[in-house]
Amino acid sequence: MDPKRISDSLSVAPQITAADIPAIRDRGFRAIICNRPDGEDPGQPGFEEIARAARAAGLEARYLPVISGMVEDADAQALGAALRELPGPVLAYCRSGTRSAMLWALAQAGLMPVPEILAATRAAGFDMGGVAHRIAGGR
């Protein structure tokens, strides 16, 4: 597990396992968001397995699955709402972390200047230049 810090309230990571949960807790995360649909890849841990381990470790967990390449504005709004509702900091994960970073970037549209959004994701290793127009409100 290699979380990448996007903001004070969110880091993103590739797929995690139940065995990663103690390390996630020990790094100070208080909640987990899964942006990966169950069954996306064979052998991938299901959300319920992750959620059980998270609850046992005292973390909250939320399932906000998004199909790769099909990120909708409503998905970004759901992530934004989750970040307001869940105790932070939060770790969001998907297959590689990119989907979670994109959701955050889109959720920040109108709340932060676009260059700051792009800089935050770039600093974490995610290039959101391809969705800059959407972040700016151009859909």
Image (cartoon, rainbow, N blue to C red):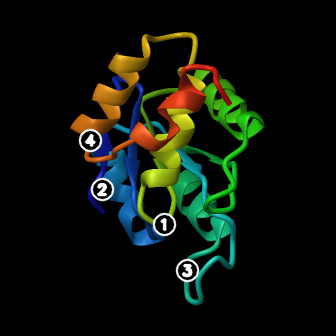
Image spot of residue 118 (x, y percent): 36, 29
Amino acid, disc 2: Ala
Pointer 2 local density, CA inside 10 Å: few below 14, some 14–19, many at least 20: few
Can see residue 136? yes
Mark 2 highlights which residue?
A: 23
Residue at the right extreme of this rendering? 74
Image label count: 4
Pointer 1 local density, CA inside 10 Å: few below 14, some 14–19, many at least 20: some
Between disc 2 and disc 3, whose residue precedes? 2
C-alpha separation, residue under disc 2 versus residue under disc 3: 19 Å
C-alpha separation, residue under disc 4 versus residue under disc 3: 24 Å
Between disc 4 and disc 3, whose residue precedes? 3
Between disc 3 and disc 1, whose residue precedes? 3
Please name whichever residue, 23 or 103, is drawn nearer the observer in this view of the structure: 103
Pointer 3 local density, CA inside 10 Å: few below 14, some 14–19, many at least 20: some
Residue at the left extreme of this rendering? 123
Amino acid, disc 1: Arg
Task: Tell me: residue 22, above or below residue 45.
Answer: above
Between disc 1 and disc 4, whose residue precedes? 1
Can see residue 58? no
Amino acid, disc 3: Gln
Q: Label for residue 95?
A: 1
Residue positioned 35% across, 19% down in the render:
115
Mark 4 highlights which residue?
A: 124
Mark 3 highlights which residue?
A: 44
Disc 4 and disc 3 in contact, CB within 8 angstroms? no
Residue positioned 51% across, 38% down in the render:
131
C-alpha separation, residue under disc 2 versus residue under disc 4: 20 Å
